[in-house]
Image: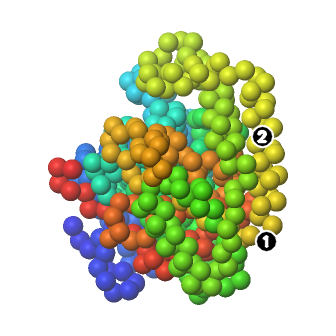
Amino acid sequence: MAEIETVTGTAAAGHEMSAVEAAARIADGGLSPVDLAQQVLARIREDDPRVGAYTVVLEESVLEEAERASARIAREGPRGPLDGVPVSVKDLFDVAGTPTWAGSAALCEAGGTPAAADAPVVARLRSAGALLLGKTRMDEFAFGTVTPGTRNPRCPERSAGGSSGGAAAAVAAGMGPLALGTDTGGSVRIPAAMCGVVGLKPTYGVLPGEGVVPLSWSLDTPGVLSRSVADAALAFAVLTGTGTDAHVEPWSVPEPASAEGLTLAVPDDALFSRCSPDVAERVAAAVDLLAAAGARIVRVSLPMADLVSPAVALIMAAEASAHHRRALRDGTALHPTTRDRLEEGALVPARDYIDALRTRQLLHTKWQEAFEGIDAFVLPTVAVPPVAHGEFFLPQPDGGMDVVPVASTRFAHPASLTGLPALSVPCGSPEDGLPVGLQFMGRPHGEQTLLRLGRLYESLSGGPWPVAEVPAGG
C-alpha cells in the first residue's frame, strides 16, 4: 500500500490521516479521494473481520463517489470542507438506498426496505463532499452500553462500549477518520472513552433527529466520533451549517496557548470514590495539567446527582417502549434483553414518567445555576476502563459492587438529562494502559468552549491517540 507524505514531512498511510489533514491534502491536489477511499477500504477488509465495527460496507458506491469527487475537484475545486473524505454512520441513520436495521438482527434478517432519502445530518455530510463508507454496528435500537459483536481495537479482549460501539471502533482502528453516532444516555461518549477516541455530544436540539430511529426522542442527540478534537470541530461545523466553505483551516480548532481566564468545576471527592482507582488518578492528573496551564479549578457537588440516572432511565424506558410498541405487539424476534427493557418501559405509570420530566426541568434549572462563574465541568466520562467481554459485576473501591450499565452511564447521564453539550477526549496517553475518558461538560450551545478545552488538553497530554493496530487473530 502506498504511503502519502503529510504536511509535516513524515509518512502516513491514508487510513492514519485525520479528516482535517486528508481534506487539506485533497484540496491542494496532494491526495486523490480514490486513493484515500481505497486505502481505508483495504484497512476495513483487513481488520473488520477481527473488530466487527461495520454492519454493511458500501464499497462499490463509495468508490463511485470517490471517482466523481476526484473529477469534480480537479475541474472546479472542493465543494465543501469534507470533499473526498470517507465517513461512516451508525445504523440508526437513514442512508438513501440502504435499509436501516437499527442494530436488530431480526430486522436485518427480514431484509428491510431501503431508505428513500438520507437523514438530514447525513445529507449535510454529503453536501460537504463526504463519502459514505457504510453503516456501523450498534446495540439493538441503541438500548445498551456494550455493542454485541464489536471488539475494542485497542484491547480486543474488552468491550468497545455502546451503543455506538461500532462507530468508535471503526475510528480507533483507522477504518474511517469520522463517524456519526447518537447519544441518548452517553452512547457517543461511552464508546469514545473506551476506544481512546474523541466523542462530541452537542446541545440537545442543535442537530435534527429526522431520519434517525429514536430510542428516546426527548433525549436523543446525533453526535460525532473522531480521532482528534480538530476533526470533531470540523464535523460539527459541517453538521451545523457553519462549515460550508471548502476551505478547511477555519474549521479546525487552533491549539490554545493556555487555559488562562477559564474556571473549571471538578466534582467533589465523594463522586470520584465511585470510580476505579485508575480512572480517578488519570482524571486527577488531567485536572492538574489544566491547572498548570492556567485554569482556575473549583470543587463542587453536582446538583441533585442522585436523581439524574433514575430520571434518565424512566424517560428512556417509557419513550423507547412507546416507539417500538409495534415490534412488541407483532412478536418481532428481538434480543431477550431488548424485549425485557421494552416490556418494562410499557409498565411505567404515566405519573412516574411525568414526574421524571418534572425532575429534568428542575435539574436543568439547577445546572444553569451551577454554571454561574463556571466555563465547564470536568469529570470522568466512564467510571471504569473498558470491561471484559461478558463482564457484568464490577467491584467498587469501597468494597461494594457495581454493574456495567451503571458504571458506564453514571457520569454521562447529567449532560443527557439536561441537554447540555459534552466532549469526551482520551485521558492520558496510550502508554498509561487501558483507555480512559476525560469529559468536559458545558453551557447550552457552548460547544466551541469544550472543543478548545479538548484541544488544549490533547496538546498537553501528547494526543491525539494514534490508530490502533489490531493484533492478528485478535
Image quadrant holding the N terminus, namely bottom left
Label 2 secondary element: helix
**Residue 265 in the image, given as x and y percentages of width and height:** 67, 68
What's the residue at 59%, 61% (across, down)? 269
Residue at 44 percent of width and 18 percent of height:
333
Check disc 1 and give the amino acid type: Gly
Residue 356, quarter of picture:
top right
Residue at image coords 47%, 32%: 140
Please name whichever residue, 1 or 370, is drawn nearer the observer in this view of the structure.
370
Give the residue displayed 77% in from the left and 61% down from the top: 370
Whichever of callouts 1 and 2 sits on the residue coming sooner in the sequence is: 2
Q: In this view, does 244 lie above or below 139?
A: below
Report the side of 472 relative to 462 (left or right): left
> Residue 338: where, in percent of width, then height?
49, 26
**Residue 315 pos. (x, y %):** 68, 33
What's the amino acid at mark 2? Thr
Residue under circle 1? 373
Q: Against 32, is 333 above or below?
A: above
Q: Name the residue under label 2.
A: 359
